[in-house]
Image (spheres, grey):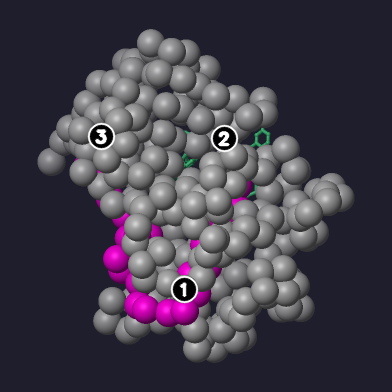
Amino acid sequence: MSEKWIETRVVENRHWTEALFSLRLEGAKLSFQAGQFVRLALDVEGERVARPFSFVNPPGDPMLEFYGIVVPQGPLSPRLEKLRPGDALYVATNPAGFLVVSELPDAETLWLVSTGTGIAPFLSILRTEAPWQRFRNVVLVHAVRHSRELVYRELIEQVKRERHELTYVSFVSREAAESSLAGRIPAAIRDGRLERAAGLALGAAGSQVMLCGNPEMLTDVTAALAERGMRKHRRRAPGHISVESFW
Ligand SMILES: Cc1cc2nc3c(=O)[nH]c(=O)nc-3n(C[C@H](O)[C@H](O)[C@H](O)COP(=O)(O)OP(=O)(O)OC[C@H]3O[C@@H](n4cnc5c(N)ncnc54)[C@H](O)[C@@H]3O)c2cc1C
Ligand SMILES: NC(=O)c1ccc[n+]([C@@H]2O[C@H](COP(=O)([O-])OP(=O)(O)OC[C@H]3O[C@@H](n4cnc5c(N)ncnc54)[C@H](OP(=O)(O)O)[C@@H]3O)[C@@H](O)[C@H]2O)c1
């Protein structure tokens, strides 16, 4: 079946760094759940080049928002970074994905763990009611190479003001950064630094963990959590870890 597309327009392309950008698009009427993704596309030399992007906006927002990084040799992301207000692009009509709160079993604490642009689906989830109704505590973990890549701080502060249950823990791996943990997430799970920073226990008894971003991080964090008796969540075999790989 051929994919169906909606032509939409760029309203804003915010640049956080030379490589990180957020596109806001005229609202295309799409039905999706927070945490899902949709394919964005441009026509390049007569061919439609499409890639999945996670919604940053919650369902029902008048504008669509996506957060991206320039992969220098990639066919699509360098072109998305250059889009300006008024430029056209295509959005597919079929959002999809299972990184959604409705798929999770009950637990005391929801851990939303991301690297890089993997924070995107969690920014959508945090602005819906479901996590706050289903979990007593919600922890957002964001790991980046450099502190200037700790994006969407204003939005996170706003969610914290409105939802006292949100705990935010950041990691900066390639420079010293005040208020962020150093190194990588799996090491901080193993040595207890992540739990200390969050002030919450991370284990099979009371936690659900959603992971998004770098596929090697997904593998390494899943292994660190397995040492605590946690396993992948499946509909037929409920567990504790739900993942979405960006490549
Ligand atoms: C379900 C899903 C959701 C996604 N959501 C997002 C999103 O919200 N934001 C986003 O920026 N990307 C997202 N991606 C990745 C995105 O689809 C593209 O792969 C990315 O924009 C690069 O596109 P490209 O055509 O330039 O290069 P590609 O040919 O697609 O990728 C080339 C290489 O770049 C690296 N790469 C790809 N994506 C990333 C990334 N996000 N961060 C760091 N390195 C990367 C990988 O090594 C990959 O092999 C998602 C991917 C999937 C599968
Ligand atoms: N155009 C540009 O100027 C530009 C600039 C920057 C990046 N990029 C592109 O973007 C890509 C990088 O994306 P990104 O910055 O989001 O990088 P990333 O490599 O996914 O790193 C993000 C965070 O994840 C951590 N991480 C990596 N592997 C991990 C693992 N196995 N377990 C746990 N944590 C892990 C990193 O730690 P470590 O630091 O320890 O690896 C870092 O803290 C590059 O490959 C490049 O293509 C482009």
The answer to which of 44 and 102 lies nearer the viewer is 102
Residue 117 at least partly seen: no
Whether residue 238 is visible:
yes
Q: What type is the residue that disc 1 sits on?
A: Arg
Q: Position of residue 230 (x, y in %)?
A: 51, 83
- In the image shown, does 8 or 132 lie closer to the viewer? 132
Query: Ligand 1 near label 2 (Cβ, under 8 Å)?
Result: yes
Tag 2: residue type? Ile
Q: Which mark is residue 69?
A: 2
In the rendered view, would you say 193 is above or below 165?
A: below
Q: Left or right: where does residue 202 sit relative to residue 59?
A: right
Tell me residue 153's x, y (percent): 62, 42
Give the residues in magenta: 94-119
Label 3 crowding class (10 Å Cα cut-off): few <14, some 14-19, many 20+? many
Say which residue appears at 39% left-offset and 40% top-offset: 57
Q: Secondary structure at mark 3?
A: strand
Residue at 36% across, 67% down:
133
Per the image, the residue denoted by label 1 is 136
Q: Residue at x 46, y 27 (%)?
A: 23
- The answer to whether marks 3 and 2 mark residues whose Cβ atoms lie closer than 8 Å is no
Q: Quadrant of the N terminus?
A: top left
Q: Is residue 12 above or below residue 243?
A: above
Which label's residue is closer to the chain start, 3 or 1? Answer: 3
As drawn, which residue projects farthest toward the right?
Answer: 176
Q: Is mark 1 within 8 Å of ligand 2?
A: no
Q: Nearer the viewer, residue 60 or 194?
A: 60
Label 3 vs 2, first from the N-terminus:
2
Q: Earlier in the sequence, mark 1 or mark 2?
A: 2
Looking at the picture, does residue 73 appear above or below residue 108?
above
Please tell me how crowded label 1 is: few (under 14), some (14-19), or many (20+) other residues with Cα within 10 Å: few
